[in-house]
Amino acid sequence: MVHPITLAATLTTATAALGACTQSAEVTDGRGQQEYGGVQTILLDDGLVSFNLAMTGAEDRADIEAYGRCAAAQYALDKGYGFARHVRTIVKKDGRTWYGDAVYMISATLPEGLRTIDAEVTAAECTELGIPTV
C-alpha cells in the first residue's frame, strides 16, 4: 500500500517537473492597444451622414460604436451643429480588425429619439477617453 504522504510528494514533484518543461509564452486573444484606422465620411442626404470606420485592438463592438459616436460628434461641431441622433451602426470583424458603418442625423436642435448626443459634451468625453474624432 502507498502511503498518502508519499503519493502527494510524488504528484507534487511530477507536476513541478512538467511545469519546468514547458516554455512560458504570453497568451493573447487579439486584443490590446487600440489602433484607430481612420474615418471616411459620406454625406448621404442633407444632415444624414455615414461614417466608415476601422480599428484594431477593440474588445468588442462597443469600441467601434464609440469611435463612430466620436466621429459624429466632431463632424456635427465642424459643420456648426450641436446635436446628432444615432440611426444605426453595422459592425463587422475580420481577423483583428473591426469595421463599422455608423449613420447619424446631425441637427442644430436636440432631435427626437432615444439615442441622441450633445456633440460638444460627447467630443469632450472622447478626448478624455483618448478616442480620436474626425
Image (cartoon, rainbow, N blue to C red):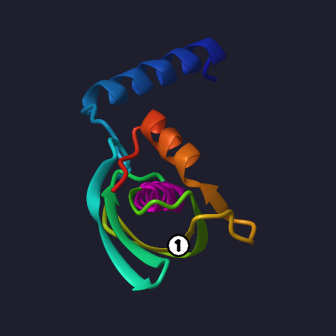
Which residue is identified by label 1?
Answer: 104
Decide if residue 49 is on the left or right side of residue 107. Answer: left
Q: Amino acid at mark 1?
A: Tyr
What secondary structure do most residues of the magenta stretch adopt? helix
Taking the spot 74% from the left edge, 71% from the top edge, the residue there is: 113
Query: Is 43 placed above or below 73 here?
Result: below
Q: Nearer the viewer, residue 31 or 124?
A: 124
Residue 117: % across, % down: 62, 57
Q: SS at mark 1? A: strand
Query: Is 101 placed above or below 16 here?
Result: below
Taking the spot 50% from the left edge, 59% from the top edge, the residue there is: 69
Q: Residues within 10 Å of mark 1 (few under 14, many from 20)?
A: many
Q: Which residues lie in the magenta part?
A: 60-77
Place residue 25 in its image quadrant: top left
Taking the spot 59% from the left edge, 70% from the top edge, the residue there is: 86
Q: Nearer the viewer, residue 47 or 20?
A: 47
Give the quadrant of the C terminus: bottom left
69 inside magenta stretch:
yes
Decide if residue 43 is on the left or right side of residue 102. Answer: left
43 inside magenta stretch:
no
Give the quadrant of the N terminus: top right
Taking the spot 35% from the left edge, 27% from the top edge, the residue there is: 19
Residue 64: % across, % down: 45, 60
Decide if residue 120 is on the left or right side of residue 58. Answer: right
Residue 93: % across, % down: 39, 70
